[in-house]
Image (cartoon, coloured by chain):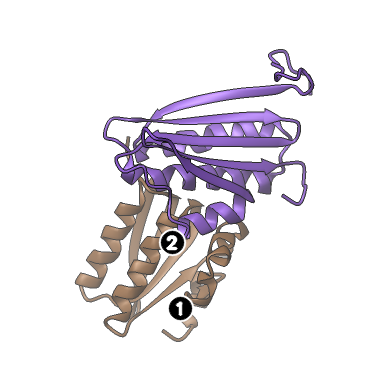
Chain colours: A brown, B purple
Amino acid sequence: MDPDLSVAIRSEGDRTVVAVSGEIDVYTAPKLREHLIDLVSGGHYQLVVDLEGVDFLDSTGLGVLVGGLKRVRAHDGSLHLVCSQDRILKIFRITGLTKVFPIHASVTEALSADA
Amino acid sequence: MTEATQTTDVAGAKPRDVVVITLPASSAYLSVLRTATAGLAARLDFTIDEIEDLRIAVDEACAMMLPQAVPGAEISCEFALEGDTMTVSVSVLTLDGEEPSRDTFAWTVLAALAGDVSSHSDPDQRVTITLRKRGGGSVR
C-alpha cells in the first residue's frame, strides 16, 4: 500500500512552500517528517506548509509539524501553515496549537506575512 | 430506519447492533478503519461533523496503542450501535499492559472529540480504550 499522501515542494523567493495533500496519519506522517528534515538539512529554514489539500489530520501529523517548527526555530527560521478548512483547524484548536503556529487562509497571505 | 438484523440486549428492551472489525495492528490499516467508522456512524444519523469527530477519535485510539502492540497481534474494534449512541471499544494485546498516557496530543484530541472516553488493562495485558458518542446533533 502506498501512503495516501503527496508532498510538493517549491521555492517562493526566500520561502519554501510545502504543499501537502491526502491523509496525514500514523502511516503517512513519516513521509512528511522526512521531507521537513531534508529541507532543514538543506538549509531551508523559512517554510510555509500548505494544508489545503489535506483531507485528514490526526495528532501524529501535529507531532510532525511541531517537530518541523522546532527544527527551523533552531536556525532562527519559521514555519507558517496554510489552512482554511474548519475540520482541520479544529484539531489545532483542541490542542492549543493555534497559538503556536501562524496559520493563514491562503499561501499568498502566508508569503506576505513576516517570516 | 428499519433494521432487519437487529439484536436485542438481555433485557430485551433496546435494539442493539454490534459490529466487530479485526485488523492487523499495523498503521497501514487505519485508513480502512476510518472509512468503516464513518459508514457505521452514518447509519445512526450522525451529522457530518459528528462523523468526522468519531472518525478521528477511533483513529487516535488505535494509533496510540500501535507502538505497544504485541508484534503480529490484531486490533479488535467493536462498534455497538444503540439508539442515537455509538460505543466503540478498541483493544489489542500489548507488550506492557500500560494504559495510554493522558498527557499527549493524541489523548487530548480523543477526549475532546469523543466526549466520553475510558481505558482499562486486563491481566493478560490486553489494553482497551472505550469511547462513546451520541449523534443527532446532541451536545455530546
Q: Which residue, given by chain and number where applicable, does mark 2 sit on?
A: A62
Q: Which residue, given by chain and number where applicable, does mark 1 sit on?
A: A111
Q: Is residue B39 above or below residue B55?
A: above
Q: Quadrant of residue B68?
A: top left
Res A16 seen here: no
Is residue B72 found left or right of B2 in the rendered image? left
Q: Residue at x 63, y 29 (%)?
A: B80
Q: Is residue B89 above or below residue B137?
A: above
Q: Residue at x 40, y 55 (%)?
A: A60
Q: Position of residue A7 (x, y in %)?
A: 35, 56
Q: Are marks 1 and 2 on the same chain?
A: yes
Q: Residue furthest left?
A: A41
Q: Residue at x 47, y 70 (%)?
A: A81
Q: Quadrant of residue B62?
A: top left
> Quick one: label 2, few (<14), some, or many (20+) residues within 10 Å?
many
Is residue A34 found left or right of B100 in the rendered image? left
Amino acid tagged 2 = Leu
Secondary structure found at label 2:
helix
